[in-house]
Amino acid sequence: MSAVTTYFNNIWLALSTIAIGMKITMKHLWGKSVTTQYPDQKLKMPERARNRLYVNIGDCIGCDQCAMACPVDCITIETIKSTPDQDLGTTSTGQKKKLHVSQFDIDIAKCCYCGLCVPPCPTDCIVMTDVYEFSEFDRQNLIYNFSIMTPQDIEKAQEKLKKAEEEAAAKKAAAAAAVAAAKSAAAQAAPQTAPATPAPASGTQTQPPSTPAPDAPGQAGKP
Ligand code: SF4
Ligand code: SF4
């Protein structure tokens, strides 16, 4: 193909592709507008859209499974054990709560909205919401605190646990001491002399049990 032919072919190709593109534009130019006038109009999020996380802390048992599933470590959970005399109630799914959730933070600025933290939750208390407008000027505001414990509540729970642990340790030590004392008393009450074994008289020798003589040759195997 000559250079001149190629030149005119290229011109034709450019004009025809522009015409095809403009045909689509013209088709929509006079048609009904489909532009969503955000933020006055908002699109409804699909049912399984992944946006801002929410934690219903009243149902959280502090099991840490959501934090372990998070690939970017943006969930921080701290818990304090309850003492035997405390009843923290149950979740709406009927699980008994045994831990105070003293800290439950999600750094949503780090979150990649993978949704991996949601399925492992045994009480379904961490969920994706349809909220997608939560921009902030201060990055610190993107760390969401879900725990409802005050610093005073935390201190009180820690002190109570410490006291309960000290009492349990003291009880354990007392029980161990009682067992040791009982063993010692039993050892003292046992007879002091063991039954004496008669010593062989000097000069005598203990005879080994006599070994039966082997059968005479030719007798072996006979009934
Ligand atoms: S959605 Fe993904 S990144 Fe965000 S908190 Fe959950 S597990 Fe972590
Ligand atoms: S998995 Fe659920 S119950 Fe366990 S710590 Fe996370 S939010 Fe709480």
Image: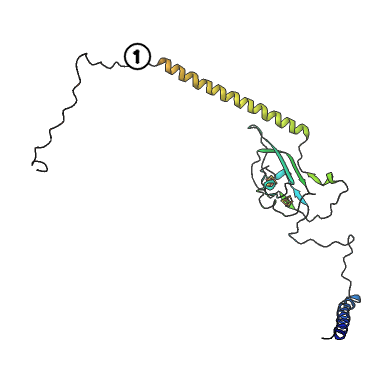
Tell me which amino acid carries mark 1. Thr
- Please tell me how crowded label 1 is: few (under 14), some (14-19), or many (20+) other residues with Cα within 10 Å: few
Residue 165: image x %, image y %?
Answer: 63, 28
- Looking at this rendering, what residue extends furthest in the right direction? 30
**Mark 1 lies on residue:** 193
Ligand 2 is within 8 Å of the C-beta of the residue at disc 1: no
Tell me the residue at 62%/25% (across/down): 167
On the rendered image, what quadrant is the N terminus found in? bottom right
Assign a secondary structure to mark 1.
loop
Q: Position of residue 50 (x, y in %)?
A: 75, 56
- Give the residue furthest to the front: 2
Left-right relation of 184 to 94: left
Residue 214, quarter of the rendered image: top left
Please, which colouring scheme is shown?
rainbow
Label tally: 1
> Where residue 133 sits in the image (x, y, percent)?
84, 54
State the quadrant of the C terminus: top left
**Residue plotted at (64% across, 25% down):** 166
For this rendering, which residue is in front, 20 or 217? 217
Please tell me whether residue 37 is drawn above or below residue 209 in the rendered image: below
Between 140 and 223, the one nearer to me in the picture = 223
Tell me the residue at 78%/52% (across/down). 52
Toward the viewer: 187 or 127?
187
Q: Quadrant of residue 199 in the image?
A: top left
Quadrant in the rendering for residue 193: top left
- Percent x, y for residue 104? 74, 42
Q: Against 162, is 216 above or below? A: below
Image-based side of 114 in relation to 200, left or right: right
As drawn, 7 above or below 106:
below
